[in-house]
Amino acid sequence: MKALMQAQEFITASEVYKATFGSCSNVFESPSMAVPIEVSYSEQQQVQLAYFLRLLKQANEENRWIMFIGQDALLDKRLLINAGIDINKVLLLRNTKNQSKHLLMAKALEMGNCSAVIVAGEIESFNTPIITMAAEHGKTLAFVLNQNVKAQLTFH
């Protein structure tokens, strides 16, 4: 896993899932936790979404919240329930004051009250030392949903 992290700045949901579950380790004990995890998927290609939901399910087992920052990051309620996620432990942070999503994510990660923080956008915008340090400090997973691809997804 460390060699994989040194080769790239961020990691995908499938890579995190395969690395942690392949070695029977906890995702929160994995060194990949502190880097932003990219989740890119489309209506035609939903593999990353499936891995993301599996990771969220594991995060949901922690006695902490799962936070979505902004309506554009929030997934369909039925999808979360079908994935085995307790929606009573899911929060939506609405950005009513138009603060930077980067700053909101950093604060949410660092507090440690969440097991996962999810934002929509481009991975490059959130792949910063501030996000990495905040995720490491809060022992929180940081997910970035690819906004351009997500808009094409429809739920049935």
Image (cartoon, rainbow, N blue to C red):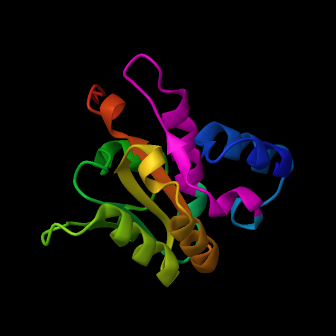
Q: Tell me if residue 34 can be seen.
A: yes
Query: In the rendered image, which quarter is residue 146 located in?
Result: top left
Pick the residue in front: 54 or 131: 131
Pick the residue in front: 87 or 94: 94
Residue 72: within the magenta? no
What is the x, y in percent for residue 85? 46, 56
What is the x, y in percent for residue 137? 61, 79
What is the x, y in percent for residue 46? 47, 26
Give me the residue at 51% from left, 66% from top: 131
Q: How many marks?
A: 0
Residue 47: within the magenta? yes
Give me the residue at 40% from left, 49% from top: 80
35 sits left or right of 73 in the view: right
Q: Tell me if residue 140 can be seen.
A: no
Measured along the vertical axis of the image, is residue 16 above or below residue 91? Answer: above
Give me the residue at 37% from left, 21% from top: 43
Quadrant where the C terminus lies? top left
> Magenta segment range?
30-57
Query: In the rendered image, which quarter is residue 15 located in?
Result: top right
Report the residue that reaches farthest toward the left. 96
Give me the residue at 54% from left, 74% from top: 134
Measured along the vertical axis of the image, is residue 40 above or below residue 36? Answer: above
Measured along the vertical axis of the image, is residue 87 above or below residue 13? Answer: below
